[in-house]
């Protein structure tokens, strides 16, 4: 039987509900013996919820800058809650009871045929302090066993996976192909000032899923 995991549908709920949801999870996990050292720390999640509430209230009837600040604060809380869900998944190891004790909703555990992973959503690239270094992250993909990150100097480079072999189509300008069990990856050794195109796809026993959107970034 497949293991239960945290449903990530809370990312799509309206901001006021999201704020209360995050606070409820802090309450449910505080003092919960299943979660001795939550990561991220619960006060950090609570502070992010308060920051979003402040900026959401200011954006109501405010100007474009207030809306931008609200959206940035929402992104911070979303990322923290995704990471908290990952932590709960690691602790629960498929237990619906433990997932539910944190107030999260578990996925169903009925046995179903393994399907190829879905498209990774919300790919984000970020400059790192070291020259030629970036990080990339996407939303967690259900049933993914690994994530492939493709960094290329052209937008349409093609990469396939056959078993454990990564096949790069010639002439695509592909620079890096990184396969990791983590959806968050760090990439170094890029050429500063060069524009790169980044995308991810997820992999499991059924094969590779579709590519994420291709997001450009200029290496710092």
Image (cartoon, helix red, strand yellow):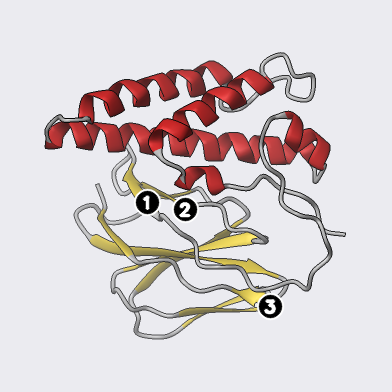
Q: Quadrant of residue 171?
A: bottom left
**In this rendering, the label closer to the viewer, 1 or 3:** 1
Residue holding disc 1 = 124
Report if the CB atoms under discs 1 and 2 are less than 8 Å apart: yes
| Up/down of 50 relative to 167, above or below | above
Residue 218: x and y, percent? Answer: 23, 55
Q: Position of residue 38 (x, y in %)?
A: 64, 24
Q: Which disc is residue 163 wearing?
A: 3
Say which of 196 and 75 sits in front. Answer: 75
Residue at image x 63%, y 60%? 146
Q: Is residue 175 left or right of residue 120?
A: left
Q: Position of residue 200 (x, y in %)?
A: 47, 64
Is the residue marked by circle 2 packed among few (<14), some (14-19), or many (20+) residues within 10 Å? many
Please give the name of the residue rendered at 39% of the width and 35% of the height, measured from the top-left corner: 15
- Using the image, tell me which numbered label, if any, was put on residue 179: none
Give the mark, 1 or 2, whose residue is nearer the N terminus: 1
Mark 1 residue element: strand
Q: Residue at x 75, y 19 (%)?
A: 32
Tell me if 214 is positioned left or right of 207 in this view. left
Q: Residues within 10 Å of mark 1 (few under 14, many from 20)?
A: some
Residue under the image location 22 percent in, 59 percent down: 194
Helix, strand or loop for disc 2:
loop
Assign the N terminus to one quadrant of the image.
Answer: bottom right
Q: Residues within 10 Å of mark 3 (few under 14, many from 20)?
A: few
Q: Is residue 1 left or right of residue 184?
A: right
Q: Label 1, label 2: how many angstroms apart (C-alpha)?
A: 6 Å
The disc placed on residue 138 is 2
CB within 8 Å, label 3 to label 2: no
Cα gap from disc 3 to disc 2, whole angstroms: 23 Å
């Amino acid at each position: 039987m497949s293991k239960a995991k945290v449903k990530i549908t809370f990312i799509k709920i309206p901001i006021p509900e999201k704020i209360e949801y995050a606070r409820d999870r802090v309450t449910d996990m505080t003092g919960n013996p299943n979660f001795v050292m939550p990561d991220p720390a619960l006060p950090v999640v609570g502070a992010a919820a308060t920051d979003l509430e402040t900026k959401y209230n200011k954006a109501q009837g405010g100007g474009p800058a207030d809306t931008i600040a609200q959206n940035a604060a929402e992104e911070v809380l979303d990322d923290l809650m995704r990471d908290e869900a990952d932590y709960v998944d690691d602790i629960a190891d498929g237990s619906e009871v433990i997932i539910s004790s944190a107030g999260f909703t578990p996925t169903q555990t009925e046995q179903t045929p393994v399907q190829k992973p879905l498209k990774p959503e919300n790919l984000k690239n970020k400059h790192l302090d070291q020259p030629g270094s970036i990080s990339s992250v996407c939303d967690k993909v259900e049933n993914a066993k690994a994530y492939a990150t493709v960094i290329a100097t052209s937008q349409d480079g093609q990469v396939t996976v056959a078993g454990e072999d990564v096949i790069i189509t010639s002439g695509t300008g592909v620079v890096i192909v990184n396969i990791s069990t983590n959806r968050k990856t760090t990439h170094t050794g890029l050429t500063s000032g060069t524009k790169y195109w980044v995308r991810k796809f997820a992999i499991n026993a059924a094969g590779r899923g579709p590519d994420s959107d291709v997001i450009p970034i200029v290496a710092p």
